[in-house]
Image (cartoon, helix red, strand yellow):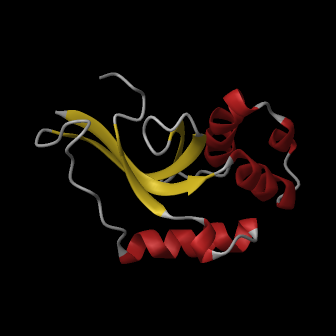
Amino acid sequence: MVFKIAGWVFSFEQARAWLKKQDHPYQHSPDEFLATELNFWFRERKIDYLWAVGTDYPRGSMQPVIVLARRRREDPKSTVSRFYRVRELDEDREVKKQVLEESGLNDEDLPWVTVADPFFEY
């Protein structure tokens, strides 16, 4: 069993560009606080369908990113190395349209991914 998330991969630069375009002060936060600041910003806007998670993607790459998670759950049939990918659904693509409009990014800039064990517990 493993906890997994599914959503779009943001670089720290992309997240800052989104915040800057919205003229938000969190754009100046250091990398290690940026996901938390995004979650505060979502809460301020009463957005409960997005969760920013700082993690390493792909796993083991030592490349820190923010995954803008749409779904999260414990998966009893998966492990860290063998897990089922979560498909991007139409309702996810509707949310992505909003993110793309606000951020000014292109669709191909934000790939949909599934990350098993984003907090490196195993």
- Residue 110 placed where, x, y %? 57, 64
Q: Kindly identify the residue that appears in the image at 86 percent across and 54 percent down.
A: 20
| Residue at x 66%, y 50% (from the top left corner) | 11
In the rendered image, the vertical position of residue 21 relative to residue 51, given as above or below: below
Q: Is residue 38 left or right of residue 85?
A: right
Residue 103 spot, x, y in % from top left: 73, 65
- The answer to whether residue 18 is left or right of residue 115 is right
The image quarter containing residue 36 is top right
Given residues 13 and 82, the one toward you in this image is 82
- Determine the residue located farthest toward the left in the rendered image: 77
* Residue at 76 percent of width and 58 percent of height: 18
Q: Nearer the viewer, residue 36 or 87?
A: 87
Quarter containing the N terminus:
top left
- Name the residue furthest top: 121
Residue 13 appears left or right of 86: right
Q: Position of residue 4 (x, y in %)?
A: 32, 42
Residue 121: x, y in percent? 34, 22
User: Which residue is found at the position 45% from the left and 56% from the top?
Assistant: 7
Instruction: Locate residue 92: give its quadrant.
Output: bottom left
Where residue 106 sits, quadrant-wise, is bottom right
- The quadrant the C terminus occupies is top left
Residue 71 vertical placement versus 121 (above, below): below
Task: In this rendered view, identify the residue nearer to me: 122 or 96.
Answer: 122
How many marks overall?
0
Q: Residue furthest front?
A: 61
